Image (spheres, grey):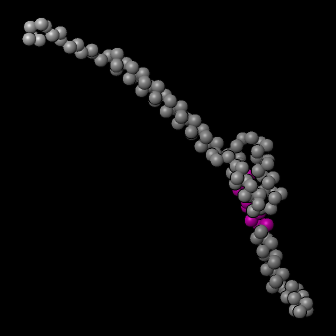
């Protein structure tokens, strides 16, 4: 039995297949590291957070490190955060302008006075 197993493991096809699988895994690991690097740079400007994210993928195997990164990464990119701030400011300005226009229109509305009812009209 051990002779058969030994001959299979020494086979050129098996060795080539193992080398290809290891090369694919190394390529996948490098691709994940590059993606995490690109992604974390777009999500935070905090250098410590960037280093921790990239290091987690490098030192904690690609899949385990990637799972940790996906859990700890910021939810929005820097551009999305900036757009959200701009939209919030615009909404506040619109609301402030709307309140001012409401106050102005209330002041400008002529007050309608009811005519006084005389004693003769009451009868």
- Residue at left offset 79%, top offset 54%: 56
- Where, by quadrant of the figure, is residue 102 drawn? top left
Would residue 95 be seen by someone viewing this image from the given angle?
Answer: yes
Please state which of residues 113 and 96 is positioned toward the viewer in this rendering.
113
Instruction: Report whether 8 appears left or right of 89.
Output: right
Residue 63: image location, x then y, percent = 75, 62
- Which residue: 78% across, 74% down? 21
Q: In which quarter of the image is residue 114?
A: top left
Residue 6 is inside the magenta segment: no
- Locate the N terminus by quadrant: bottom right
Q: Give how far across and how far down residue 99 sits, in percent.
A: 43, 24
| Segment colored magenta | 26-38
* Residue sitting nearer the eye, 81 or 42: 81
Q: Quadrant of the C terminus?
A: top left
Q: Is residue 115 left or right of residue 50?
A: left
Query: In the rendering, at what x and y percent does residue 66 appear?
Result: 73, 58
What is the quadrant of residue 61 in the picture?
A: bottom right
How many numbered discs sit on the rendered protein?
Answer: 0
Main secondary structure found in the magenta portion? helix
Q: In this view, does 42 lie above or below 88?
A: below
């Amino acid at each position: 039995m051990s002779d058969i197993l030994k001959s299979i493991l020494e086979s050129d096809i098996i060795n080539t297949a193992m080398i290809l699988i290891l090369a694919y895994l190394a390529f996948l690991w490098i691709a994940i590291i590059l993606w995490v690097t690109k992604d974390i740079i777009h999500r935070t400007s905090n250098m410590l957070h960037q280093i921790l994210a990239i290091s987690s993928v490098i030192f904690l195997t690609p899949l385990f490190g990637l799972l940790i990164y996906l859990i700890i990464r910021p939810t929005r990119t820097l551009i999305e955060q900036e757009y959200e701030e701009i939209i919030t400011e615009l909404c506040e300005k619109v609301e402030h302008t709307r309140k001012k226009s409401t106050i102005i229109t209330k002041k400008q509305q002529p007050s309608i006075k009811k005519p006084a009812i005389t004693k003769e009209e009451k009868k």
